[in-house]
Amino acid sequence: MKESNSEKRVIIAAVIPTFLERGALWFAENEERVLRAAKTQPWWQRNILVLEVGTALKLSGLLRRLGDLGYQKSQTIISPGEFATLGDTIRVSAINRAQIARIEFHGNTIEAITDEEFAAPPPKPKKKSREITFREGEYVVHLDHGIGIYRGTVSANNESITNKRIRTFEKDPLFVEGHEFHVIEYAAPRRGAPPDRLLVPLGQEKRLSLYIGFEHPTIHRLGGQLWPNTKRKIKASADQFARELLSIYAKREGKERPPMHGDRAMETGFADAFPFIETPAQTRATAEIIADFEKPTPMDRVLAGDVGFGKTEVAMRAALRAVLSGKQAAVLAPTTILVEQHSRTFTERFSDFPVRVAALSRLTDSKSEKEIIESLARGRIDIIIGTHRLLSKDVAAPKLGFLIVDEEQRFGVRQKEHFKKLRSELDILSLSATPIPRTLSLTLAGLRGMSEVNDPLPERIAVKNFVLPFSEDIQIKAIKEELARDGQVYVLHNRVETISLAARKIQESLPDAAIGMIHGRMDEKTLLHELNRFREKKTDVLVATTIIENGLDFSNVNTLIVENATRLGLAQAYQIRGRIGRGDRQAFAYFLYPAQHLTPEARERLETLEAFEALGSGYEIALRDLEMRGAGAILGKDQSGAVQKGGLNLYCQLLSDALETLKGGTAELL
């Protein structure tokens, strides 16, 4: 660890929102003012600790004071807000300093104060061909030998490679001194034997891919028949799926419908009524969708963009074009909350236009449901919004021509199978904040178009992120600061069993605040009642599970506190962060973690989330989340098994090869 010059004094600021927002540069520029205030003003005295060489102070007293200031003890310091102890030395990562302060005691006196730089991250391996890098311990798939564990690289003159269980990928002529190899560890050939290791020459990475699938896949044996048989089944599944995909899209190509030209004057009036400034990305995406509508074949397009970037507005303009062309439109959403949000938004937006909007979900009473289904069947409803209830056999829309699917990845396998059949008949627009592997692979294969809404609305401000060890003090102080500016707060506690206790503890600390609570096991009427109270600002703090991930759009909520961010996936955390900062006020997101139980994987997710603070990072987040967490079924139940057995990367590679072969005419469609 690199040390700098000794210091005579160090200032340690409390871990509170006021100081977190200001940062190290502000403290460096205002050091003298801070010192003067810390000597004379009680508030500053409570929240600033000044330590000097020669000061008489018990080490135990300093540890208690650090705890009072919101610092958390940790074995290894990885972020500001933590401290570590070793004998008579305390190392503190103060939130107001760019370096770690090393404070050494001699008895009950501070003997020395020095600065330490944070440990530099290990250098990343140089990227080889195909821009692929692997990390030690990751599961990888070799095209010829199956799933193994990556064990780094080794040179041909390394003594360890003379082990008889090491095998080279190519013939011996490549095995020359100085040549470097990737080392892949496979299962032992027999019980009690050391594992086999395969050497793959650098430059042959095209035969390797990162395994994405089960958390702990089956490791294959070298030279056995399991992998050849497995690969044969995966290839058969990919070939069948490719034929199915091309068959679906061939039917689409064969299908013709009258181009949808709409009513330009009314569409212009609808666009002019948009209460915000339209972004260039919204204009471009709308134009791409309208161009698809004016073709004689059905559309299948993905509309990707961060939460709050205006995807819904683009979808509503598309729905208007379909309705003005004599079609009915349907909006399919995965949750009742999202249906209610869309119903509210669509109804308000179309209130001055001759478009009839209705919603259908489990909250719809039986009498209203019957009336809506009957009106839909008679063509009296132009836009129907609902959950998977819309896919029921008793729901019919005779003029249905346009389907909007919001967050398609959140639907179950049966619904995904249903979507595949619909693709040959309807114009489909799928909305997604963080595109998932299935979406990315199909768009990259050229089977689905993609439009991106990646420009934030002009008044939007990027959310400020703070990744810190968990502290009840910082949680309460962050809530107080938000309430002081008449705002509202989300507190994410993602355990239904203890969420009531979490809400009660906040209420005890803030007796004058109105605390609400929602989670997925509530009946939906109670849940929506609590949400309406929050919408009407009758509730100040909403303690919730990840149920807030989709469908909530409250511009007055500008502080998010995640009590244990390690429980969230990367894309999920990013999606939840998008629930705040939807107005023109600076928003703050606190991702707290248990300092004593932070795994390397959780740390990497939190670091990535902190790094991608800028507006419009959803696409990059999706790719990183795919890399870290893997993926499940690529499109439906028939493909999921094959994907898991060989990994998503291999499956997509085989699928791409099959599509190219079939497109080239070397095989006929089934």
Image: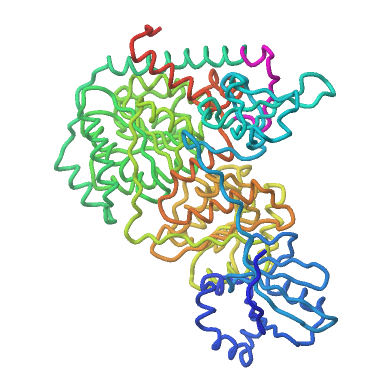
| Direction bottom: furthest residue | 40
Q: Which residues are magenta?
A: 212-228
**Left or right of 586 on screen, residue 179:** right
Residue 88 in sight here: yes
Taking the spot 54% from the left edge, 51% from the top edge, the residue there is 608
Taking the spot 67% from the left edge, 84% from the top edge, the residue there is 8
Question: For residue 330, what is the image quadrant?
Answer: top left
Magenta stretch holds residue 225: yes
User: Is 297 situated above or below 76?
Assistant: above
Residue 375 in sight here: no
Report the front residue among 479 and 72: 72
Report the front residue among 643 and 155: 155
Task: For the C terminus, give its image quadrant.
Answer: top left
User: Is 658 situated above or below 647?
Assistant: above
Magenta stretch holds residue 512: no
| Direction left: furthest residue | 265
Task: For the N terminus, give its image quadrant.
Answer: bottom right
From the top left corner, tell me how far across and down residue 620 is, in percent.
46, 45
- The overriding secondary structure of the stretch rendered in magenta is loop
Q: How many marks?
A: 0
User: Is 466 situated above or below 480?
Assistant: above
Taking the spot 75% from the left edge, 27% from the top edge, the residue there is 163
Question: For residue 195, what is the image quadrant?
Answer: top right
From the top left corner, tell me how far across and down residue 517 is, in percent.
61, 54
User: Is 129 situated above or below 579?
Assistant: above
Report the front residue among 95 and 125: 125
Taking the spot 14% from the left edge, 42% from the top edge, the residue there is 265
